[in-house]
Structure formats: structure tokens, C-alpha cells
Image (cartoon, rainbow, N blue to C red):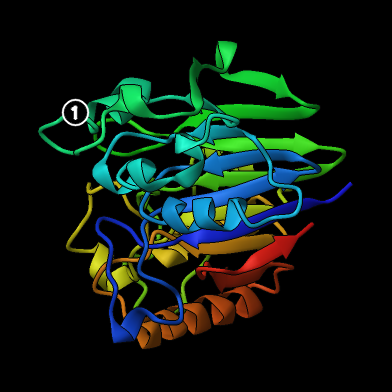
Amino acid sequence: MSAFVRFWGTRGSIPTPASWTRVYGGNTSCVEVRFDDTVFICDAGSGIRELGKDMVTRKSNPNEFHLLITHTHWDHIQGFPFFIPAYMKTAQIRVYGAYQLLSGQMSSEYFPVSFRDLGAAIIADELPNGEKMINGVRVRHFPLSHPGGCVGYVFEKDGKKIVYATDHEIAPQPGDKFPDLENNGPLRSAPADFLKIIEGADLLIADAQYNDKEYATRMGWGHSSCFSVTDAAIRGKVRNVALFHHDPECKDIDMDRKIQACCERVIRHNADLTVFAAREGMELKF
């Protein structure tokens, strides 16, 4: 059994189509996680439009989807009205979280097509007591630090573990070197409950919207420094970490610099961790 992850939207806050976002992408949050024929969709940012177009061209052409919403900020729900399977009578979409907001944004004040006119069977679902077995996949949610509230998701099956933790702020703790502009400080601390959640993950998809200099002026906004994410991944013995939720002002060349700095940090701490930036169209197999 293999797990597949594909990035359809990697940007935070607002879609950013531009010549300088061509490499890492300008669509907002949407990640596809597949175990065998079971399709999970993490968030419905503008990237879900491209996912829907791709779905209808696949040979397997899945007709059941599990849509897991982390929170209801616009960049995580704005693409749903453009998701082609939502208009197909053969499709079933089970929505975990934010069902009312998904339908509300399709009222006539915001969108010309009514939620009632969608062809698919759209079902409000939940993870009782925070977790549920879905076609043999253990799916859990856990709280994240973000204004207004947010949850992350863990997917586990046959020893494979994928963690999706966007819009999460790992704040510096007393004793941490911050900002670490020289990139020579010790490993930073991280909340014990978060480390327990991500421990041993094959892939951690984590909000790393800022570098240290940027984060210093945005503390409390609900997003993390790439160094804090890297250090948490090292402490949690994560195998791979994808930096995610790229800032709208972050150019491709800026992202390259962030990745280089994080990789240097991994080497300096002699850690067994691969760090990379999530990129639209990138597909991973575990």
C-alpha cells in the first residue's frame, strides 16, 4: 500500500498569480492525500479548481471525496464553488467542518449559483471524538494555534503517516534564540502536544509563511517562521517536511533562500530530515 500526496494550492491569504510565483504556485491551500482509492482533500482554497479539472480526466475517475476543512478563512474555502465534481450527480462529497460556510458563500450575494443547485450529494460529516476510520485510514484532527481557531489532520494506514498542519503558529519560547538572523542558534523548543502529534511522520505539511525577520513583526498572526517549523520537525523525528502556506509577497527566489537556510540548519544539527517547499503540481509517494 502506498500513500500519495499532491499539492494543488500552496499559497496563503490570497491567490497570487504572478511571474514571480510560477515555480511554487499562486493558488491558495488545497492538498490531495490518497490511500489506494480513498481521496482526501485538505482545504478548498483556489487550488481545488485545478484538482477538480484533473479528477474528471483520471481513468479511475473517483466519485467519492472526503473534504476536510481546517478553518473558514477565505483562502481555505474560496475555491469550492469552482470544484467540478460538486456539479456531478454521480459524485458524493463528505465535508468535515465548515459545511455551513461552504453553502453560505454560495448565497446570491456572493455567487450566481446556489448551493442547492449543485448536482453532487454533499454530506456534512464529522470525526467523532476527534478521529474516525475511513476505508481503513485512521483520520484524526488536532487543535492549532491560529486566530479564530483551526485544526490540523493526521492520516495513518499501514505504517504510513501524513500530517497536515497549516495556519499554525509555533511561538518562540524563553531561551530560544530569536530572531536567529545568523542561523547559528540551538534547536528551538516546541509544544509537547504538537511534537507528539507529528512524531515519526513520513511527511509533515506545515505552515512556514515567514522567515525569522518577517515573523518578528507578525507575531500573533497565526503563522510560523520556517526555522521554528524545521526545528519542530527535527525534534519530532519527522522524515520529510514541506514548507507550506507561502506568503503572498514571497517570490520564488525568496522561497529558494528559505529552503537553503532551512537545509543548512538541518545539516548543522546533524538531523535526518528532508526539507523542501510545497510546489503546485508536486506529487509525492510514501
Q: Which one is nearer the viewer's eye here, 88 or 245?
A: 88
Tell me the element at label 1.
loop
Residue in the picture at 30% in, 34% down? 72
Other-residue count near label 1 (Cα within 10 Å), few / some / many at <14 / 14–19 / ≥20: some
The image quadrant that residue 218 belongs to is bottom left
Query: Which residue has dot 1 on it?
Result: 107
Quarter of image, res 58? bottom right
- In the rendered view, does 272 fall on the left or right side of 249? right
Question: On screen, 94 above or below 230?
Answer: above
Which residue sits at x=55%, y=42%? 41
Specify the quadrant that holds the C terminus. bottom right
Residue 147 position, x and y percent, is: 24, 37
Residue 188 visible in the snapshot:
no
Does the image show residue 63?
yes
Residue that extends furthest to the left in the rendered view of this protein: 109
Counting labels gives 1
Give the amino acid type for the residue marked by disc 1 in the picture.
Ser
* In the displayed structure image, the side of residue 20 where residue 29 appears, left or right: right
- Please name the residue shown 75% across and 36% down the image: 156
Q: Position of residue 192 (x, y in %)?
A: 55, 37
Could you say where residue 19 lies in the image, as x and y percent from the top left? 31, 86
User: Where residue 207 sits: x, y (%)?
Assistant: 43, 55
- The one of 246 and 118 positioned closer to us in this rendering: 118
